[in-house]
Amino acid sequence: MSPLFNDVFLKACRSEHVPYTPVWFMRQAGRYQAEYRSIREHYSFFEISRHPEVCAQVTRLPVEKLGVDAAILFADIMTPLKARGLKVEIVEGVGPVFDRPIRSGADVAHWKPLDPSQDLPYVLETVDLLHSQLDVPLIGFAGAPFTLASYLIEGGPSKNYHQTKAFMYAHPEDWAALMDDLSAMTLDYLLAQIHAGAQAVQLFDSWVGAVSEEDYRKSIAPAMNRIFSKLKETEAVTLYFATGAGHLLTEWNKLPVDVLSFDWRTSANDLRRLGITKAVQGNLDPALLLAPQNLLRARAQTLLDQFQDRPGYIFNLGHGVFPEVKEKTLRALADFVHTYTSQNKPE
Ligand code: CP3
C-alpha cells in the first residue's frame, strides 16, 4: 500500500484515534456532476458497470473533485439481482422497477444462485482496478435483504411497504426462504468485493425503518446476523445504513457490525440514551445542501460538536445527495469538516 494512503476513514470505523473527522457522502457519484452526466450520454446506468475503466473513473470522480476520505464502488443495489437474470430497470426520477413482482415462494424457487466471478466479473475487475488507483479506501456495498425484498415484492419504490409486510406476515416460510436467498447472495457478493480489494463494505437497508422492532428482531435480524458474522471473519470494516430506523438502533447495536449509519431523525443524545456503543456515521439532512451556505455550515458544525466525543465518528449525510446539489457545496462542506475538526480535535 502506498505511503500516501489515507486510512483515516478505516481508523474511525474501528473507533481508533484520528487526526480529523473523515467524510464521504452517500450517492457521491451521480447526476449532480457534469462529468457523470456526460458519461451517461454514452452509457446507460448498468452499462457503466460493465465497463471497468469507465466505472472506476466514475467511482474516482468524487474523490478527485470533493476531497472525500473514501470512495464507494459505482453500482446499484439491484446489480446482483440483474446479474441473476431478474428483469429490473432503473427508471429516472423513480428508481428500480421490476417487470414481475414476486407473489409467493414459488416465484423465488427457480432463481439461480449468484456466482460473483461468473455473473459479475466486470464489477470485480473494477474493484481490482480501483485498488491500485485509489489513495483512499474503497467501500464495496450491497442492498440488505429487507430492502431488496421490498423492491422485489412491491415491484418498485413504495411509500408504506404494505405488500412487503403482508408477505412477511401471511407467508412466514416463504419470507424466511426469501431472506435466506437474499442474505446468501448479499454475503457472496460482498465477500467477492472484499477479496477483490474493497477495504470496507456497507449494507444499504434504506427502507427497513418501516418495520417494528419486534418484526425486525424476528424476521430480519437473523439474516443480518448471518451476513455480518461471516463478514467479521474478513479484514474489512462493516457499515449498516437505513433511514427512519432510530427505533431499531438497539437491535442494530447487538449485530456484529462495526459502524451504524442513520439519518437526521436520530440525534447524538438519542444514541447516548439508547446506550449505543459502536462507531457511527451520519447524519446531515441532505436537504441542507440546498439551504443558504451559512445555515448549512452552522448545522454541520453542530453535528461535529455533538459527535466529536464519541470514539468513532464518520461525517456523512442521512441519505443520498440530490441531483440539484452543486458540486462546490459538497467540496466546501468536506473542506469544512476537515479544517474544523483538525483544529478542534482533543489530543
Ligand atoms: O455514489 C454512490 O453512492 C455509489 C453508487 C450508488 C448508487 N446507488 C448509484 C445510483 C449506491 C450506493 C446506490 C445504492 C442504492 N440504490 C440504494 C441505497 C441507498 C439509498 O439511496 O437509499 C437504493 C435504495 C437504490 C435504488 C435506486 N437506484 C434509486 C432509488 C435510484 C434513483 C432513481 C433516480 O433517478 O433518482 C437508483 C438509480 C441510481 N443509483 C443512480 C445512481 C447514480 C441515478 C442513475 C442515473 O440516472 O444515472
Image (cartoon, grey):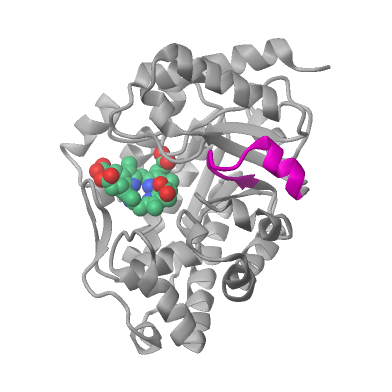
Q: Residue at x 56, y 46 (%)?
A: 197
Choose between 233 and 282: the one closer to the eye. 282
Q: Residue furthest left?
A: 41
Q: Is residue 312 visible?
A: yes
Q: Which residues are magenta?
A: 260-274
Q: Where is residue 320 shown, x and y percent of the image?
A: 41, 39
Q: Residue at x 72, y 35 (%)?
A: 312
**In the picture shown, does residue 170 fall above or below 271?**
below
Choose between 288 and 6: the one closer to the eye. 288
Q: Is residue 49 visible?
A: no
Membership of 269 in magenta stretch: yes
> Which quadrant would residue 58 be assigned to in this image?
top left
Q: Where is residue 266 shown, x and y percent of the image?
A: 60, 42
The quadrant of the image that shows the C terminus is top right
**In the picture shown, does residue 212 fall above or below 53?**
below
> Which quadrant would residue 225 be assigned to in this image?
bottom right
The quadrant of the image that shows the N terminus is top right
Q: Where is residue 179 shown, x and y percent of the image?
A: 51, 75
Q: Residue at x 46, y 38 (%)?
A: 26
**In the picture shown, does residue 257 fall above or below 116?**
above
